[in-house]
Image (cartoon, helix red, strand yellow):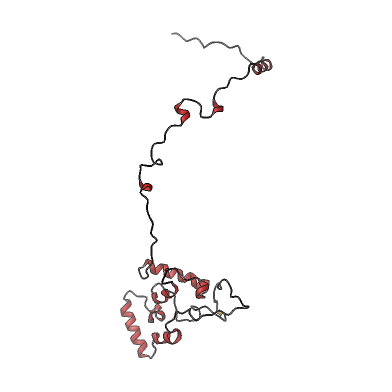
C-alpha cells in the first residue's frame, strides 16, 4: 500500500529502485507510509467509511462537482480530496483497484464511493491509461462472427436481377404506358387550337445527291 502515498515520487522508469530509495529515506526519518495507511484505513478501501453530510433523510442523488474551489475546501470533502497523500495516477495501481469491482471489472459509480465528479473524471482517465499501459487487467467482450456476414454467396453481394417490367419490355409503372385519349376530347382540343395546329403529313422526303 506504500504506492498509494508515493505515486508522485515514482515517476521515473526505474520504479523499483526509486521505491527502495524513498522507502529507505522515509524509514530513516521515522515515517512509514504503509503504517500510516494502515492506521487510517486499515484493510478497507479509502472510501469504505466515508459518509457525506446532507440535509434531510434522503441522501443526494449526485455527488458534488468538486470539493475544492480555489483556496476553499468544503466541510465534507470526498475520500480523495480529504487526504492530500492520495493521488490519482495510472501508476498508482493499488489505489485504482479500490474503485473497480473485482467481480465485473466495472468502475464503481460515484454515488457508491462518494467521490466528487472532478475526481471521478480523473479516476476514469487514470484507469483507462493504466489499462492501455498494461498495468490493469480488463476483459474484452466476446463477439460471435457469423460466416454469412463475410461470405459472397448471399443476395446482398450477388448480381441484381432485372426488374420484371424490363424483362417484359413494358413501362415500369402502368401510368407510364400510352393510353389513347377519347375521340370526343380530341375533337374539343382540335376545335380550340385549330389556328395553331398543322396538317399532318408523312415523313420528310429523303435527300438524294
Vertical position of residue 76 compared to residue 157: above or below:
below
Instruction: Pick the residue in front: 198 or 99.
Output: 99
Q: Quadrant of residue 200?
A: top right
Instruction: Pick the residue in front: 8 or 119.
Output: 119
Image quadrant in which the N terminus is located = bottom left
Vertical position of residue 207 compared to residue 92: above or below:
above
Instruction: Pick the residue in front: 44 or 88.
Output: 44
Instruction: Pick the residue in front: 159 or 148.
Output: 148
Q: Residue at x 42, y 34 (%)?
A: 161
Q: Residue at x 42, y 76 (%)?
A: 95
Residue 173 percent across, percent down from the top left: 53, 29
Which residue of the protein is positioned furthest toward the top in this rendering? Answer: 208
Q: Residue at x 34, y 81 (%)?
A: 19
Callout count: 0
In the displayed structure, does residue 96 sit left or right of residue 52?
A: left
Q: Quadrant of residue 196?
A: top right
Residue 73 percent across, percent down from the top left: 55, 80
Residue 183 percent across, percent down from the top left: 63, 16
Vertical position of residue 93 compared to residue 139: above or below:
below
Residue 78 percent across, percent down from the top left: 52, 78
Q: Residue at x 49, y 69 (%)?
A: 121
Image quadrant in which the C terminus is located = top left
Amino acid at each position: 500500500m506504500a504506492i498509494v502515498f508515493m505515486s508522485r515520487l515514482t515517476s521515473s522508469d526505474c520504479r523499483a529502485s526509486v521505491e527502495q530509495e524513498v522507502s529507505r529515506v522515509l524509514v530513516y526519518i521515522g515515517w512509514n507510509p504503509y503504517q500510516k495507511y494502515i492506521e487510517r484505513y486499515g484493510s478497507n478501501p479509502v472510501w469504505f467509511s466515508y459518509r457525506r453530510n446532507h440535509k434531510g433523510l434522503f441522501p443526494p442523488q449526485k455527488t458534488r462537482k468538486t470539493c475544492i474551489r480555489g483556496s476553499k475546501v468544503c466541510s465534507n470533502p470526498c475520500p480523495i480530496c480529504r487526504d492530500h497523500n492520495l493521488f490519482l495516477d495510472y501508476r498508482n495501481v493499488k489505489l485504482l483497484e479500490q474503485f473497480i469491482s473485482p467481480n465485473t471489472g466495472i468502475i464503481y459509480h460515484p454515488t457508491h464511493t462518494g467521490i466528487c465528479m472532478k475526481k471521478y473524471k480523473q479516476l476514469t482517465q487514470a484507469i483507462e491509461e493504466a489499462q492501455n499501459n498494461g498495468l490493469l487487467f480488463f476483459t474484452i467482450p466476446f463477439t460471435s462472427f457469423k460466416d454469412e456476414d463475410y461470405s459472397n454467396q448471399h443476395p446482398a453481394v450477388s448480381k441484381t436481377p432485372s426488374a420484371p417490367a424490363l424483362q417484359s419490355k413494358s413501362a415500369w409503372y402502368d401510368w407510364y404506358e400510352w393510353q389513347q385519349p377519347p375521340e370526343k376530347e380530341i375533337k374539343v382540343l382540335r376545335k380550340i387550337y385549330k389556328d395553331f395546329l398543322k396538317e399532318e403529313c408523312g415523313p420528310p422526303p429523303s435527300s438524294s445527291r
